[in-house]
Image (cartoon, helix red, strand yellow):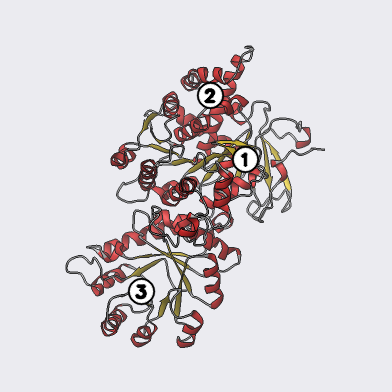
Amino acid sequence: MNDYSLYLVTSSDNLPPGATVESTVREAVRAGVKIVQLREKNLSTRLFLERARALREICQPPVKLIINDRIDIAHACGADGVHLGQDDMPLLDAQKIFRVGEIIGISVNTIDEALAAVKAGADYLGVGLAGRLEPNRSQPIKLLVWPRGVKAIRDELDRLNLSTPLVVIGGINSTNLIRTLYGCTSNQFYYARRAESPIGVAVVSAIMSSPDPYRATQKLQNMIQEFEAWLRTPEGPFLDPDVTLKLNLAASMIKFHEKTSTPLVHHITNTVVQNDCANLALAYGCSPIMSSNLGEMEDLIKLKAGSLVLNLGTFDDNQVQAMKLAGRHANLTGKPVIFDPVGVGASQERKNKANGTPPSVCSSHPFDWEILRHHVNWTTLKFRYYSVEILNAVQMSVIKGNQAEIASLARFNSSGTSSCGVDSNGEVEAPDVLVKNLARQELCIVVMTGKTDWISDGMHVVRLQNGVSELASITGSGCMTGTSIGCFASMIQPEVDKDTQSGLLMNLKSMHQDFGGDTLIASILGISTINVVAELIHQSENEKSDFGPNNLVSNYFEISMFFYATRMTAEEVLSMAIHCTCDTYILLIRMCPLFPSENANSGQDMFITSNGTSWKRINAEMNISSVFFHSDAENNFPPASRDATIE
């Protein structure tokens, strides 16, 4: 099988002084590159052939030499294959010329193109991370793919059991390599860690323009190998998920209360809530800063450990650029990034154009920018585009939103959900499915707030039912929830060498290490703390006939600081954070091959309580928080997200 993991594409442009294409390729091959594509757009046929023959001498087996576009050159120099674009010779005609066993790669940008190429027999697919970073009205954008579009292609191929390798290309270097690889990872990651379909990266300037191509290649190679080793490492079994979750929650709360430093929680947020979020971070014993100054983004991210909270409530150009810049640096250092896509589903028009025809910028299909401009209001499109742009540029640790916002991002059919400004009305159907799907789509923790809060890491779904109705009447309460999550997440940034660009990988290892990974735990604690504090206020004020949102606001920070200062024991915190009306924590497990049990048949529901009480003895009307393990079968989920009658 050919090794596409690191695919070198040559370029004569921007070679360092004294270097040649041949000398650079020689060093890259010596460092471990197994496939090289010769791409020359401006050479005559004679010079092209001379260079191809020179590289043929360098690229000896097992190294493969691929020629871009020119089938005649590939034949003449004895290359191992050719790479063709959509406008080049059709694949079926090229196969008539090439010998059996020679490699033919095809450039694709959509799911349809990918399926057609695979059906025709392509050996691998090249996908360009195409698209201008900024929409420009005067220059049409023909294709927008990015890692999330590549992932959509990979997901569809895997769904059809097609294992044709994908090779992504487009400005990839050591600073965005892990983000690209992880962003392109398919949903197979959640089913069977060993079954991940191959994704390779094609690099050009990261090696060709390097003064030391050998070391540059080694660095990329080491990062790829470390990522792939982690990606294919299955999760270890855990005997008692109930105990695992409780222990992890308790340990994280104790660690947070006993911290000896003040983590920096950097906000790029809307102007309405800056003061409230800053005060809340202080109440939690963290150090807040509110800055969107482009010139200091890198310095602030590297200043000290903490987290980054991005809030799209203010979506001017500078704000979005600051979010992307800060987010990229946060990824490099492993700093958790919490994203609140405020108002992303604020209008039916926006949802229609984002999810209907013409295709949205989230789609894996290309769209004609000029056509799209005539179908949707520019401001509306710009708002929607900003969310997608940020999600493509930055790997999020947590996405938090209300039902309308989460449904909009998930491209979910939310006919029962409407949005008024940035508020959510109505209830989505199957909220467990919704958060799980978006978690898998964006490869991060997803938090959906509402009367019931839902959290998923793509494998597990947690339901939290604390809080008071008055929270919905407070401006910025949702934004403050993002701050709360950011404060708890500020404790999980790994210690990394800032020169290795390995921070994101270490963060991912923490996120997916086992059930109850650090980021999932931080999200649960962040939401539960907000809700429990609101309940404390409600309990202390419930004798007042005029209790309402104003009482909640006036008392919130006082109670928050008391909550933090008194250092409530982990048991006290968790007993309130999990639920306030039931002293037994219930766990519902959907048995499936991933979680075998001697006591249950595959597909059976098994109910476990922390004190051994049988399910039938638990009052069905109790306010119960649950954790669901979803079966791998598509849309085959336990019914616990809906009210059930217990016989």
Residue lying farthest left? 18
Q: Earlier in the sequence, mark 1 or mark 2?
A: 1
Residue at coordinates 62% horizontally, 29% vertically from top-left?
466
User: Depth check: 111 or 154 in front?
Assistant: 111
Residue lying farthest right? 647
Which label is found at residue 418? 1
Q: Return the residue at label 2.
A: 569
Q: Position of residue 624 (x, y in %)?
A: 68, 33
Quadrant assignment for the C terminus: top right
Q: For the residues marked 3 and 2, what is the alpha-carbon distance in whole angstroms?
A: 61 Å
Image quadrant where residue 76 sits: bottom left
Q: Earlier in the sequence, mark 3 or mark 2?
A: 3
Q: Return the residue at label 3.
A: 37
638 vs 64, left or right, is right
Residue at coordinates 31% horizontally, 46% vertically from top-left?
498
User: Depth check: 211 or 113 in front?
Assistant: 113
Of circles 1 and 3, which is in front? 1
Picture layout, residue 306 above or below residue 412 = above
Query: What amino acid is at disc 2?
Result: Thr
Of circles 1 and 2, which is in front? 1
